[in-house]
Amino acid sequence: MTRPTSSVDPAPSRLHATSLSTGYGDRRIIDDLDVRIPDGSFTVIIGPNGCGKSTLLRSLVRLLKPTGGSVLLDGTDIAHTRSKELARQIGLLPQTSIAPEGITVIDLVSRGRHPHQSALKRWSEHDERAVQKALTRTGLADLTTRVVDELSGGQRQRVWIAMALAQDTPILLLDEPTTYLDISHQIDVLDLCTSLQREGRTLVAVLHDLNQAARYATHLIVLDQGRIIAEGAPTDVVTADLVRDVFGVGARVIPDPETNTPLIVPHAPVFPDPGAHPAPAGPSTALMEGTR
């Protein structure tokens, strides 16, 4: 599969990477990647496990140092940007976070305001409003005095999201923000992302649920083996061929009856290896045979 090309001028992008290569130790995950995050978009990165989604996200906020190329914010390599200045522009919800022992919800969320503090600029009413707004938007206003370690996994995830919101950055990166959340709170978080995008922020999220990605993203990036396979509006990107080639699953792609966005209906895994064991005989066998 080749990456789609377009003669249309690219959308404005404060945050983009050029010839980016990076990884962990001697293992290179991303090699010579060019990527632009459209301003004001809700960009969602999808792809199979281990393809480089989280690696790319961590590189965009300087948690991973490039071995080649660069990440640019407003035309300046973020390698040369002061840490607090970068943190005032780009917020990150990491995939896993560990709260300090005994810290309360209000204290952890308030740490999101740290990049805005200095020796000359102490805690202000603006900081207080930002924290309270973040708590309200994540449904945590009644849990402010609770110790974070005593909360459920879903509640803790919302606390970390609230801290990222309190940071109040124009660009927000979220690595699997719906982890640990039930379907109701997943929808709440993704609806919140849409609201933030419509207010003018730029969001980039890694999601595993392809249907949620197709429903909520305004811009989709499909990664496979550290390369961008396709990108663009979900209606232009998500096809049965893409699902088969990237995820190894046979599927129909139909319009979602609620949103008219692509809806993926999987029916069988694809076994490209002729030596792979066929599925047991049953109702799905004929469908599987049609996808080989």
Image (cartoon, rainbow, N blue to C red):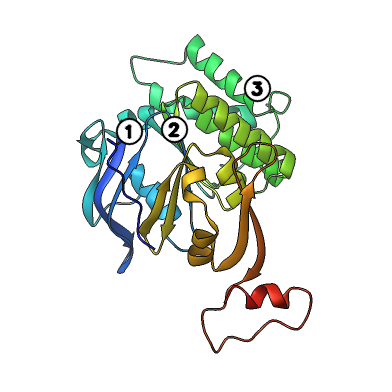
- Residue type beneath disc 1: Ala
Q: CA distance from mark 3 to mark 1?
A: 33 Å
Mark 2 highlights which residue? Answer: 41
Classed neighbour count for the residue bearing mark 1: other residues with Cα under 10 Å, few (<14), some (14–19), many (≥20): few
Pick the quarter of the image with the C terminus: bottom right
- 209 vs 254, nearest the viewer: 254
Q: CA distance from mark 2 to mark 3?
A: 24 Å
As helix, strand or loop, the secondary structure at mark 3 comes to: helix
- Residue type beneath disc 3: Thr
Q: Position of residue 120 (x, y in %)?
A: 33, 14
Q: Nearer the viewer, mark 3 or mark 1?
A: 1
Q: Residue at x 56, y 78 (%)?
A: 271
2 and 1 marks in contact (CB < 8 Å): yes
Q: Position of residue 216 (x, y in %)?
A: 57, 38
Mark 1 highlights which residue? Answer: 11
- Residue type beneath disc 2: Ser
Q: Could you tell me if residue 49 is visible in this image?
A: no
As helix, strand or loop, the secondary structure at mark 1 comes to: loop
Mark 3 highlights which residue? Answer: 136
